[in-house]
Amino acid sequence: MIISYKRPKAFLFDVFGTIVDWRSGVANVSQQFFETKNINQNSHDFADAWRSKYQPVMEKIRSGNRGYFPLDLLHRENLDQLLLELDLTDKFNEDEKQELNRAWEQLPPWPDSVAGLIAIKKKAIIAPCSNGSIALMTRLAKFGSLQWDCILGAEVAQNYKPHPDAYLKSVAALGLQPNQVVMVAAHNSDLAAARKYGLLTAFIARPKEHGPEQTIDLEPLENWDFIITKIGELASI
């Protein structure tokens, strides 16, 4: 029997773009390498190009054409391909490539994220429902002082959003029903999938996620259950 609950028992969060600024974080770490090596490469363009390879490799896994691999390894595969495309492969030794790949563990939270999560945590369970691995999410949480109750998402599900397992296995891991859980994201497509599988939804716009010329996810495209301007607003639900 499905029961309706007045107050959500848990909040699951998209992380890259919703809680942390992946573009600036990756660009900052990359820029340090470029300056040290006298490489003439725009670090924000580099971050964008690296990120553009994100969905295609995950789609191979979602479609069943490839077994599950943690995002850390997929990021490294994409980094190797990007360095090859930019004719930069020989500029980095193996240790440096590994260190550059850890840029994804050093992403700054948006200004409202840390305090907002702390406020929500006083009333409900909070956890990432991210495509990041447990290792990546743990180190990112340490870096950004993100006080999750636990880490859920792709590695628990052995699949990537928007595959239903990414949402439903995360909910099940908490011993809850989908209608007891809110999925929070800055991406309309993420929320559309979560709603399809029975979760409540909360949208927050992050208009600088993709830089000053961002054209997507500037506003909610559906009547989501909650539309917020700061993460902490969810603490009052």
Image: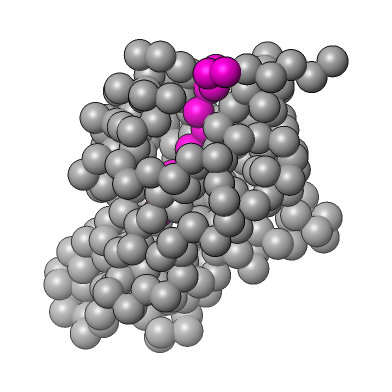
Residue 93 appears anywhere in the view: no
Percent across and percent down for residue 229 are 32, 46
Q: Quadrant of the N terminus?
A: top right
Of residues 80 and 117, the one drawn nearer to the viewer in this rendering: 117
Of residues 221 and 110, the one drawn nearer to the viewer in this rendering: 221
Q: Is residue 65 left or right of residue 117?
A: right
Q: Residue at x 41, y 65 (%)?
A: 218
Of residues 210 and 62, the one drawn nearer to the viewer in this rendering: 210
User: What are the residue bounds of the magenta stretch?
Assistant: 6-17
Q: Residue at x 27, y 74 (%)?
A: 212
Residue 10 belongs to the span the image colors magenta? yes
Depicted 108 relative to depicted 94: above or below: above
Q: Quadrant of the C terminus?
A: top left
Residue 196 in which image quadrant:
top right
Percent across and percent down for residue 207 are 33, 63
Q: Residue at x 49, y 57 (%)?
A: 220
Percent across and percent down for residue 232 are 31, 32
Residue 13 appears anywhere in the view: yes
Q: Is residue 34 left or right of residue 233?
A: left
Percent across and percent down for residue 115 are 24, 30
Depicted 224 relative to depicted 45: above or below: above
Q: How is the image coloured?
A: one colour
Q: Is residue 40 left or right of residue 8?
A: left
Residue 2 belongs to the span the image colors magenta? no
Overall secondary structure of the magenta section = loop
Residue 210 in which image quadrant:
bottom left
